[in-house]
Amino acid sequence: MEGSTVKFVALVLILCCARSSLAAEYTVGDQLGWRPLVKYYSWVRSKSIKLGDTLVFNYDASQGYSVAEVTQFKFIACNATNAKYFDNDGHSSVTLTEPGQHYFMAAGHCADQMVFSVLV
């Protein structure tokens, strides 16, 4: 029985490590980065983003751009207050650790189309 437990624990560890090694990193907007007037919905549809993947946002912080992950309600209202995640340093990374719909926006730049959502 003890040998079976050790084998089971080893198998679980191997599967956990294999899953994390399969995680991918996506630069939002690819070479265009996170900036106004990029078609982010087209960009996200062209990717196979999964649980555990990381989204990297590269942007010009001096232009007032930011990254916020918000609720659906805040997303619809273009409101980044009390965001789940917020950063404005020009290089931001968000690892998708929870399944479901994730909503991203640049505070104050919804009219510039700096918004998208992704289902993981």
Image: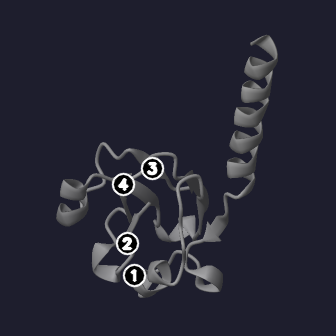
Q: Going 68% across and 50% down the picture, which residue do you hit? A: 19
The three-letter code of the residue at mark 1 reads Tyr
**How far apart in space, not on screen, are marks 4 and 3 (Cα)?**
19 Å
- The answer to which quarter of the image holds residue 41 is bottom left
- The answer to which quarter of the image holds residue 72 is bottom left
Label 3: few (<14), some (14–19) or many (≥20) C-alpha neighbours in 10 Å: many
Q: Earlier in the sequence, mark 2 or mark 3?
A: 3
**How far apart in space, not on screen, are marks 4 and 2 (Cα)?**
14 Å
Q: Secondary structure at mark 4?
A: loop
Up-down relation of residue 55 to residue 38 (above or below): above
Do the residues bearing badges 1 and 2 touch, measured as CB atoms within 8 Å? yes
**How far apart in space, not on screen, are marks 2 and 3 (Cα)?**
15 Å
- Which label sits on residue 86? 3
Q: In the picture provided, is 29 more to the left or to the right than 86?
A: right
In this rendering, does residue 106 appear at all?
A: no
Q: Secondary structure at mark 3?
A: strand
Q: In the picture provided, is 118 more to the left or to the right than 95?
A: left
Q: Earlier in the sequence, mark 4 or mark 3?
A: 3
Q: Going 62% across and 81% down the picture, which residue do you hit? A: 30
The quarter of the image holding the C terminus is bottom left
Q: Earlier in the sequence, mark 1 or mark 3?
A: 1
According to the picture, the residue beneath numbered tag 2 turns out to be: 116
Q: Earlier in the sequence, mark 1 or mark 2?
A: 1
